[in-house]
């Protein structure tokens, strides 16, 4: 059965003290208030990972993620962070292909396919992001565009490797804009993505793949969005920076 997941992507926010305080609040609220089997994932900036891990490592349902990684294993790549470094500080998931990485840092489908392999080889799980611009949606090509992103980044994997991947659908026009996709738009895209996975890997693997929605998800709209039968949780930006909002989103299940 697929997992229900709410992942907080802190992006380039929070220094160490702020990040540790936020994590403690989330862990305490989660313990006291969350009684579903949903998993929480915290995707903190690199310098905070080890400290955040210290606060979550003894919990059952809170996991650590990085926001990207190098496609190289080790060596003379100044400024890069390898998957073995990440796994050594307790990282279990790595976000790959966020539209901010694809856009601002020119991460191509080829690089993302390599990063996917590197993450899986290190025993971690990719949270692989896809999503269309407003222009693509208005052109009517959005389903094909987003399915093609999955094909290019993931479909070289064998079935066993693919079964470790989490997918996150994040329409670019809904990220940080306050303009969320409607519950119908999210469900419709998730259904297409699951059918696309089923065509390649079969129905059982598709049914077991968690597909998260991201883009202006908040406590006020999470329950409606998560009610979609193919929506298995959220990848949360702005609202993950406040413990109350993040935990209330988890409680939306
Ligand atoms: P917002 O929730 O701030 O729109 O960000 C979504 C996102 O990009 C998560 O990765």
Image (cartoon, rainbow, N blue to C red):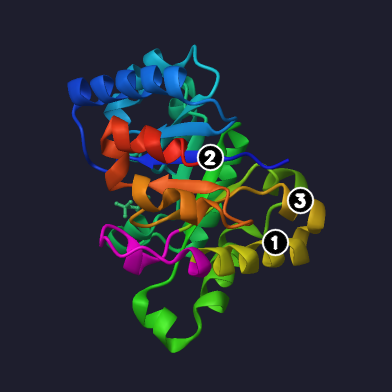
Q: Position of residue 248 (x, y in %)?
A: 38, 36
Mark in front: 2 vs 3: 2
- Please name the residue shown 41% across and 40% down the image: 249
Q: Position of residue 179 (x, y in %)?
A: 30, 65
Q: Position of residue 183 (x, y in %)?
A: 48, 63
Circle 1 Cα neighbour tier, 10 Å, few/some/many (<14 / 14–19 / ≥20): many
**How many marks do you count on the picture?**
3
Residue 173 included in the magenta stretch of the image: yes
Region of the chain picked out in magenta, as a range = 170-185
CA separation in Å, label 1 and label 3: 8 Å
Give above or below for 250 relative to 53: below
| Horizontal relation, residue 25 to residue 95: left or right | left
Q: Which residue is mark 3?
A: 205
Q: Secondary structure at mark 3?
A: helix
Q: Which residue is mark 1?
A: 197
CA separation in Å, label 2 and label 3: 17 Å
Between 184 and 160, which is closer to the camera in this rendering? 184
| Horizontal relation, residue 66 to residue 240: left or right | right
Mark in front: 2 vs 1: 2
Kindly tell me whether residue 81 is visible in this rendering.
Answer: no
Which circle's residue, 1 or 3, is located before the other in the chain?
A: 1
- Please name the residue shown 70% across and 61% down the image: 197
Q: Which residue is mark 2?
A: 5
Circle 2 Cα neighbour tier, 10 Å, few/some/many (<14 / 14–19 / ≥20): many
């Amino acid at each position: 059965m697929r997992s229900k997941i709410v992942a907080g992507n802190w992006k380039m926010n929070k220094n160490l003290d702020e990040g540790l305080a936020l994590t403690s609040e989330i862990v305490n609220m989660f313990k006291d208030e969350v009684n579903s089997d949903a998993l929480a994932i915290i995707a903190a900036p690199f310098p905070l990972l080890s400290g955040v891990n210290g606060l979550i490592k003894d919990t059952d349902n809170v996991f650590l993620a990085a926001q990207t990684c190098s496609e190289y294993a080790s060596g003379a790549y100044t400024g890069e962070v390898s998957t073995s470094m990440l796994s050594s500080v307790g990282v279990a998931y790595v976000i790959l292909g966020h539209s901010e990485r694809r856009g601002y840092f020119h991460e191509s489908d080829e690089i993302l396919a390599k990063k996917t392999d590197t993450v899986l080889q290190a025993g971690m799980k990719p949270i692989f992001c896809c999503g269309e611009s407003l222009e693509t949606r208005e052109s009517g090509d959005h389903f094909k565009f987003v399915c093609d992103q999955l094909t290019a980044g993931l479909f070289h994997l064998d079935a066993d490797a693919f079964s470790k991947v989490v997918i996150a659908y994040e329409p670019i026009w809904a990220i940080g804009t306050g303009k969320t996709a409607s519950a119908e738009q999210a469900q419709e895209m998730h259904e297409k993505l699951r059918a696309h996975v089923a065509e390649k890997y079969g129905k059982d693997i598709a049914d077991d793949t968690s597909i998260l929605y991201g883009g202006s998800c908040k406590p006020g709209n999470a329950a409606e969005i998560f009610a979609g039968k193919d929506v298995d949780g959220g990848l949360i930006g702005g609202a993950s920076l406040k413990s109350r909002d993040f935990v209330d989103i988890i409680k939306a299940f």
